[in-house]
Image: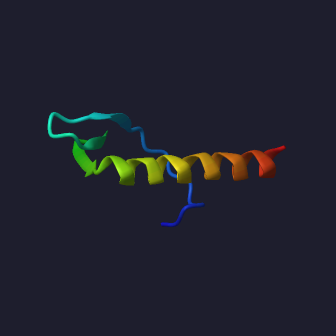
């Protein structure tokens, strides 16, 4: 499965700070829970990548 492979899976995602000063991305789907913790700097890099991908997607779709 790649980035362009469509799947019909429903998932919930939560993002927030932990009590240890990390940023957690928590994904739950089909009974599977995936907590991913990142240092704040790593989380900012991920946010930048998401913004860049959104901008690229806008240029493709319109």
In this view, which residue lies farthest toward the bottom?
1
Q: Residue at x 22, y 44 (%)?
A: 33
Image coordinates for residue 50, horizontal then vertical, percent: 55, 48
Image coordinates for residue 29, horizontal then vertical, percent: 31, 42
Q: Quadrant of residue 5?
A: bottom right
Q: How is the image coloured?
A: rainbow
What is the number of callouts on the image? 0
Q: Residue at x 70, y 47 (%)?
A: 55
Horizontal side of 24 relative to 6 (left or right) equals left
Q: Is 52 located above or below residue 18 in the figure?
A: below
Residue 29 in view here: no
Horizontal side of 16 relative to 33 (left or right) equals right
Horizontal side of 46 relative to 18 (left or right) equals right
Q: Residue at x 35, y 35 (%)?
A: 15
Image coordinates for residue 2, horizontal then vertical, percent: 52, 66
In this view, which residue lies farthest toward the right?
62
Horizontal side of 55 relative to 44 (left or right) equals right
In this view, which residue lies farthest toward the left?
20
Residue 23 in view here: yes
The one nearer the camera, 19 or 14, is 19
The quadrant of the picture occupied by the C terminus is top right
């Amino acid at each position: 499965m790649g980035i362009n492979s469509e799947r019909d899976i429903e998932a919930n995602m939560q993002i927030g700070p932990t009590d240890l000063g990390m940023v957690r991305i928590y994904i739950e789907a089909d009974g599977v829970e995936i907590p991913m913790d990142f240092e704040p700097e790593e989380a900012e890099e991920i946010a930048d990548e998401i913004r860049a991908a959104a901008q690229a997607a806008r240029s493709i779709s319109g």
